[in-house]
Image (cartoon, rainbow, N blue to C red):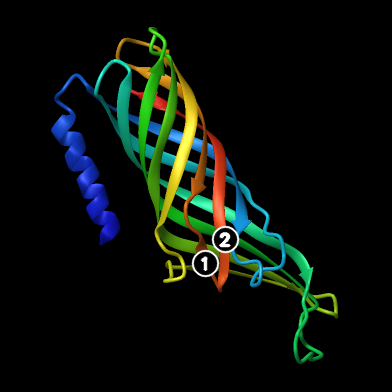
Amino acid sequence: MKQGLLLLFFFVATTAFAQTKKFSVGVSGAPFWSRYLKTNTSVIRNKPQGGFGFQPGLFGEYAFSSRLSLRVGVGYLGVPYNIPRMKLVFAQPEPNQPEFGAIEIDDQFLSIPMLLKFYLGETQKWYSIVGTGIWIPVGVKQKSTLWYPDGSVTTNSTRSNPTTGRPTLLNSSVGFGYEFHLTPKIHFFLEPTATLTLGSFSGWDVALRPYTAGLNTGVRF
C-alpha cells in the first residue's frame, strides 16, 4: 500500500509539471558495486562479501534556474551479499549434520531518490549531485549451500516477502555527472555516484549497513 501511494504521488507530480518547459523526464540504469558495514559485530562474526547489482529507474526533473534542478525518481534494485563457505559448529553435534555452509542473499528494494543537481560552468554539461532517498524493502532472495561429511552437497533457494527485520532505509547520495546534448531536448548522461544508507537492515538478527558505488547512465528529454 505504501509503495503504491508513493508511485501515485510521483506520477501525479509528473503530470502536473509536464506542461512546463522547466520540466523533463528520463530513464536510467545504474550498474553498481555494493559492500556492507557490520553494525553488530557480536551477532555476525564472519565478514559478509558484497557483489554487483543493477538499478533501472524512471525520473522527473524540474529546473528552478539554469544552475539548479531537482530530480525525483523511482526504481528497483537488488543489493547482494554473501557469507562464503565456512565451518559449521553445533552446540550438540550429530552424525548427519553438515560440516560447512554458505549463504547468498539478494535484498530487493523499491528506490525513491530525491537529488539536487548543481550545474558547473556556462555550458550546462558538468554538474554535481547531492541528495537523499529511501529504499523500501519488497522481497528477499536467498540461496543456502550445505556440505556434508559423506561428500554430498545440498542447495536450497527461496524467495520471501520483506519481514519486520528489514525496515525502510534512508540514504544519502553524492556524485557528479556529464551530459551529452544530442539534440536541444535529448540529453544522454553519465553519473558516477556513491550511496550510503543512514541505518541498517537486519535479517536473522544480523545487522548490516549497505553502501554502493556505481555509474548511473540514462537519457533525459
Q: Please tell me whether residue 111 is drawn above or below residue 167 in the rendered image.
A: above
**Quarter the C terminus occupies:** top left
> Going by the picture, which residue comes out furthest to the right?
150
Residue 107 or residue 41, whichever sits in front: 41
Q: Please tell me whether residue 117 is drawn above or below residue 187 in the rendered image.
A: below
**Residue at (21%, 46%) from the top-left corner?**
9
Residue 111 seen in render: no
**Quarter the N terminus occupies:** bottom left
Q: Please tell me whether residue 143 is drawn above or below residue 12 in the rendered image.
A: below
Left or right of residue 42, residue 4 in this image:
left
Disc 1 + disc 2, Cβ < 8 Å: yes
**Residue at (62%, 65%) from the top-left corner?**
143
Residue identified by numbered label 1: 202
The answer for how far apart the CA atoms under marks 1 and 2 are is 6 Å
Dot 1 alpha-carbon crowd within 10 angstroms: few under 14, some 14 to 19, many 20 or more: some
Report x, y in % for residue 215.
53, 32
Helix, strand or loop at label 1? It is strand
Looking at the rendering, which quadrant does residue 81 occupy?
Answer: bottom right
Report x, y in % for residue 27.
37, 32
Return the mark for residue 82. Answer: none
- Amino acid type of the residue that numbered disc 2 sits on in the rendered structure: Leu
Residue 113 seen in render: yes
Residue 195 or residue 12, whichever sits in front: 195
Return the mark for residue 208. Answer: 2
